[in-house]
Image: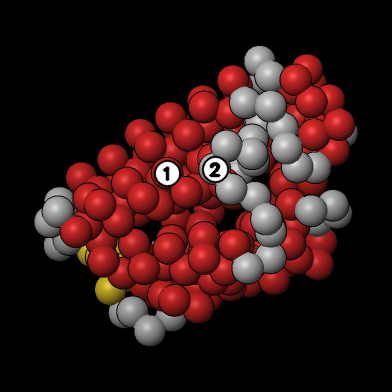
Amino acid sequence: MDGMKNSAGKPVLLKMVSAIQKNKDYLSEVDGLIGDGDHGMNMNKGFTLFGDQIRDKEISFTDGLNELGNLLFSKIGGSMGPIYGTVFMGMAGAGEKFELIDGAAFAAMLDAGLTDLGDVVEAKVGDKTLVDTLSPANDALQKAVKEGKSFPEALVIMKAAAEAGRDSTKDLAAKLGRSSRLGERSRGVLDAGAVSCCIILISMADGILEQLKA
């Protein structure tokens, strides 16, 4: 079956939680090179609270994304809570009508998340933010789906684009946020938001791939 039942998406959500928990120290380490150093701690706090909330209840993939988005909005300090909250709630809103999450549905969801994010932040590709991961990942997914790739193939292509986008931030100078004050000195370091976005997208894709094989 080239799709995942929306109602069967809880394991995907928990895989995302686990991925952030496992990488919390790394995220703070990356963030500490040009930022506050609290990105991993904040992300871990939000995702762990979410994991605890859903662990013992039935929840669909899109309902879970909406719940996660709302929680991040209210529980994570700084800019990242509203940023990720916007993305996840945008994805949830676009996907709630789908009983089956296939390539086209997931592409519509990711595109909606990125579009909604663009309504609240000015960041563009090249600014050294999570958009450098999210935008090329979305572009690659849209292209793969339009070309008729299977859902698993499209997810693998999206993952590769997310990794390339993440890695691209190392050579960029930050133009937004606290790290932008460093100017050229911000080059040579990955952007923490781009790294966490890559972790989230890869864990989400891997979780869906596992469900497709089940």
Question: Label 2, on which residue?
Answer: 125
Question: Label 1, on which residue?
Answer: 136
Residue 58 visible in rendering: no
**Quarter of the rendering occupied by the C terminus:** bottom left
Front position in the image: 120 or 192: 120
Question: Closer to the observer: label 1 or label 2?
Answer: 2
User: Is 165 placed above or below 52 here?
Assistant: above
Left-right relation of 29 to 128: right
Residue 137 visible in rendering: yes
Residue at x 59% of width, y 62% of height:
118
Measure the C-alpha gap from mark 1 to mark 2.
8 Å
Q: Position of residue 148 (x, y in %)?
A: 12, 56
User: Is 181 placed above or below 62 here?
Assistant: above
Mark 2 crowdedness (10 Å alpha carbons): few <14, some 14-19, many ≥20: some
Could you tell me the amino acid type at mark 2? Val
Outermost bottom residue: 97
Left-right relation of 212 to 83: left
Sequence-earlier tag: 1 or 2: 2
Front position in the image: 2 or 169: 169
Mark 1 crowdedness (10 Å alpha carbons): few <14, some 14-19, many ≥20: many
Front position in the image: 22 or 139: 139
Residue at x 40% of width, y 52% of height:
138
Q: Position of residue 19 (x, y in %)?
A: 56, 40
Residue at x 33% of width, y 79% of height:
98
| CB under 8 Å between discs 1 and 2 | yes
Could you tell me the amino acid type at mark 1? Pro
**Quarter of the rendering occupied by the N terminus:** bottom left
Q: Quadrant of residue 195?
A: top right
Q: How is the image coloured?
A: secondary structure
User: Is 73 placed above or below 157 here?
Assistant: below
